[in-house]
Amino acid sequence: MPDFAAPDPAAPLIVDAHLDLAWSSLANGRDLTRPVAEIRRAERRTRDNVMLTLPDLARGNIALVFGTLYAQPASLSFAQDLVSAHPGGYTTPAEARAQATAQLEQYRRWEDGGHLRLIRHLPDLDDHLRRWPQDAVPGVVLTIEGADPILAPDEFDWWWRQGVRSVGLAWTGTRYAGGTGDPRGLTLPGRELLAAMRERGALHDASHLAEEAFWEALDLTAPGALIASHSNARALLTSAGRADLPPDRHLSDDMIRAIGGRCGVIGLNLMNSFLDADWTLQGRAVPVRVRDQVARHWAYVSELVGWHSVGIGSDLDAGAGREESPEELDDAADWPRLAGAVPEEHREAVLGGNWLRVLRANLPRT
Ligand SMILES: [Zn+2]
């Protein structure tokens, strides 16, 4: 059996709603069943240093994560770094599907090896939360980031049967919707895919959705099923010199209100450049800290929609690694330090309770 650190029963349980675990493993040839320290020693990287691995999640009291199936396109108008560091992206729907199914198989191998528990139904969640304090095996909810791997809307049922419980239609734009750096609305297949998701009860993840598509999608999404797993407040991220950060990557105040007004949750993305528009990997001009920028983002969003609508969606899976993370976060064991950015009476909800509420309301009973 894998060896897991014991969680701290006194600290709030943490849910992180955005980690590209299978992508991080396959794209970097990295064994995420090993501890962070071991991987760092072996890789000796100067950037994209790993932050979280499966056995280390419990060291940070991280009981549950949303794990992505993320297919990377061959070209796009932003994140050129990422594309040049990981060539071989998809140019056709079949290639996108192949990337996502390879990642699905990776999650299954981890599940078979006892390294995680996939959460497919409500009883799985209850069972997981009962067992986790003793065995510390992390729970994973599967989510598709960028829907191009779904060949057609009527294929969604197949993905649902594989355990996918959340879908973001876009990363950059896809065949289904406009996305980051690609401003357009929903396509007809996008509308049909949202209908298929709604019929099943899947969560609709609006992170990366272009603004036009976001507003078109509102009425097509079940109340209570709209989330933004890893997006921040656009109002705090205006900076003159940042052509690499399309403004639609983050949420306007009206979008934040729309998600909060439907009982959804917005996960705070913890990449430095998404916390402070003056921070760049090359320049690193400003220090980014949990107690400063992280606290400011959560305070801003909660001012608009309340503390019951905010959570964590860190994205710190080494697509963005240690070098792009707030000062206080060195690896998974430091996630409890995020509590310092939240008023004490709201800590349990923001660190995990809000995401658990959304999952309880949406996961299928059987
Ligand atoms: Zn993303």
Image (cartoon, helix red, strand yellow):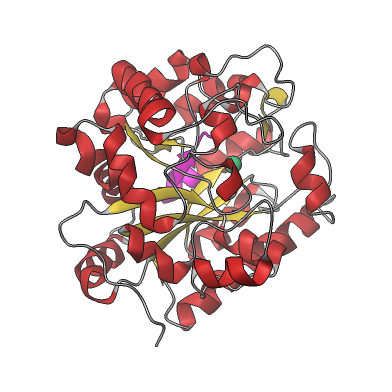
Quarter assignment of residue 208: top right
Name above or below for residue 301 compared with residue 358. Answer: above
202 in magenta:
yes
Q: Position of residue 355 (x, y in %)?
A: 32, 45
Q: Position of residue 269 (x, y in %)?
A: 49, 37
In this rendered view, identify the residue nearer to me: 307 or 207. Answer: 307
Residue under the point 47% across and 63% down = 163
Q: Which residues are magenta?
A: 197-207
Q: Position of residue 193 (x, y in %)?
A: 58, 42
Q: Quadrant of the C terminus?
A: bottom left
Number of dots carrying numbers: 0
Name above or below for residue 123 compared with residue 66. Answer: below
User: Is residue 120 shown to the viewer in this render?
Assistant: no
Residue 140 appears left or right of 250: left
Q: Quadrant of ligand 1?
A: top right
Q: Position of residue 177 (x, y in %)?
A: 66, 33
In this rendered view, identify the residue nearer to me: 252 or 285. Answer: 285
Name above or below for residue 164 compared with residue 175. Answer: below
Residue under the point 26% across and 50% down = 360
Quarter assignment of residue 124: bottom left
Q: Quadrant of the N terminus?
A: bottom left
